[in-house]
Amino acid sequence: MGGVYQTVYVSGLSSVTIHNSDIYRTGDWYVRCNVGDPCTHDFTNNYWDGADSADDIAAGIWDANDTDETPMVIDFTPFSDEPLPNEPASWSDVKAMYKSGQ
């Protein structure tokens, strides 16, 4: 996911859900949709860094509202107008999430 052109790149057949996250614009787009089946991706309740309004967020999303090249739509409302709190985790905590049997 992501790169220098966009932060999140959505492609394929299933819908994506991202909630309660801080999304930073690392390139031209926050989110860019590619080809795939018509669907709505759920990006609600996120903080969009650098955006002051729904129009700012929409301007950073490339989806079916911008082109006929993709049938995918990003639903981003409601959204947070401030960064969301996070819970610090050590590398041991992160590794423990991926150990077999857990």
Image (spheres, rainbow, N blue to C red):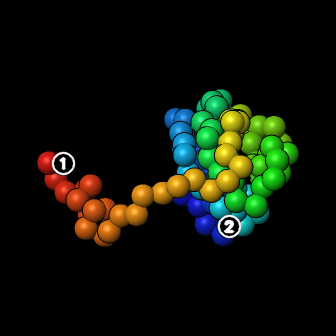
- Seen in the picture, residue 35 relative to 6 is either above or below; the reply is above
The residue at the point 73 percent across, 58 percent down is 29
Residue in the picture at 62% in, 46% down: 46
Q: Position of residue 7 (x, y in %)?
A: 63, 60
* Relative horizontal placement of residue 34, taking residue 97 as reference (left or right): right
Tell me, yes or no, if residue 74 can be seen here.
Answer: no
Q: Residue at x 70, y 59 (%)?
A: 49
Please tell me which residue lies in front, 72 or 29. 29
Instruction: Identify the residue under disc 2.
Output: 26
Asked which quadrant contains residue 75, the reply is top right
Q: Which residue sits at x=25%, y=67%?
A: 92
Query: Is 39 situated above or below 35?
Result: above
Side of 86 relative to 71 (left or right): left
**Left or right position of 99 against 80:** left
Q: Nearer the viewer, residue 24 or 79?
A: 79
**Number of other residues with Cα within 10 Å of mark 1, as a class: few under 14, some 14 to 19, many 20 or more:** few
Q: Residues within 10 Å of mark 2 (few under 14, many from 20)?
A: some
The percent position of residue 94, horizontal first and vertical second, equals 31, 62
Q: Identity of the amino acid at label 2? A: Thr
Q: Is residue 89 among the parts visible in the rendering?
A: yes
Quarter in which the N terminus is drawn: bottom right
Give percent across and percent down for residue 102. 18, 48
Give the labeled residue for mark 1.
102
Three-letter amino acid code of the residue under disc 1: Gln
Nearer to the camera, 6 or 43: 43
Image location (x, y in percent) of residue 16: 54, 40
Q: CA distance from mark 1 to mark 2?
A: 33 Å
Tell me the SS state at disc 1: loop
- Contact, CB < 8 Å: mark 1 with mark 2? no
Q: Secondary structure at mark 2?
A: loop
